C-alpha cells in the first residue's frame, strides 16, 4: 500500500510508509547474515537463515523469494531494504 508515490523509473515506484506501518528491522541484521561482506545475501547465507528459523517461520522462504526483485542469485542490500522498509521513510514497490 502506498500513501504517497513517485515514479522512479525502472520497475519500481517509491512509496512512503508511515511510522505505524511496521516495526523496523534491526540495523545489524543484513550485515550479520552477509558473512562475506559483499552486500549480497548469497544462497549459502540465506540457507543458514532457513536452517535457523524455518521451523518457527514457515513463510520465510516465500517471503525472501519475493524480496529478490532483480531475479539474480541472492538478495542485495537494496532488495533487503525493499522488504524491510524503515518506518517513516520512502521505499520502493514493484510496478
Image (tube, rainbow, N blue to C red):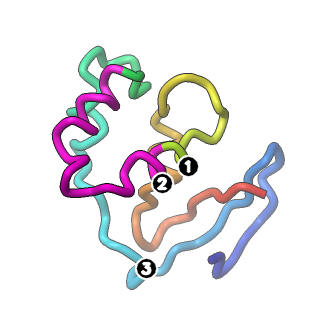
In primary-sequence order, the first of circles 1 and 3 is 3
Looking at the rendered structure, the secondary structure element under dot 3 is: loop
Q: Which mark is residue 18?
A: none
Q: Which residue is disc 2 drawn over?
A: 83
The front one of 87 and 40 is 40
In primary-sequence order, the first of circles 1 and 2 is 1
The front one of 28 and 51 is 51
**How many neighbours does mark 3 have within 10 angstroms: few (below 14), some (14-19), or many (20 or more)?**
few
Q: Which residue is disc 1 drawn over?
A: 66
**Dominant secondary structure of the residues highlighted in magenta in the image:** helix
Q: Is 53 included in the stretch rendered in magenta?
A: yes
Lateral position of residue 2 relative to residue 27, left or right: right
Please identify the quarter of the rendering in which residue 36 is found: top left
Identify the magenta region. Answer: 44-64
Compared with 47, 56 (above or below) is: below
The residues tagged by marks 1 and 2 sit, at their Cα atoms, a distance apart of 8 Å
Q: Are marks 1 and 2 in contact (CB under 8 Å)?
A: yes
**How many neighbours does mark 1 have within 10 angstroms: few (below 14), some (14-19), or many (20 or more)?**
few
Lateral position of residue 77 relative to residue 60, left or right: right
Q: Which residue is disc 3 drawn over?
A: 21
Compared with 70, 40 (above or below) is: above
Amino acid at each position: 500500500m502506498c500513501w504517497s508515490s513517485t515514479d522512479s523509473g525502472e520497475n519500481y515506484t517509491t512509496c512512503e510508509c508511515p511510522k505505524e506501518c511496521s516495526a523496523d528491522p534491526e540495523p545489524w541484521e543484513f550485515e550479520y547474515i552477509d558473512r562475506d561482506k559483499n552486500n549480497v545475501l548469497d544462497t549459502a547465507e540465506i540457507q543458514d537463515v532457513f536452517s535457523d528459523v524455518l521451523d518457527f517461520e514457515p513463510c520465510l522462504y516465500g517471503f525472501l523469494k519475493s524480496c529478490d526483485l532483480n531475479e539474480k542469485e541472492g538478495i542485495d542490500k537494496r532488495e533487503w531494504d525493499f522488504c524491510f522498509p524503515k518506518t517513516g521513510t520512502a521505499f520502493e514497490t514493484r510496478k
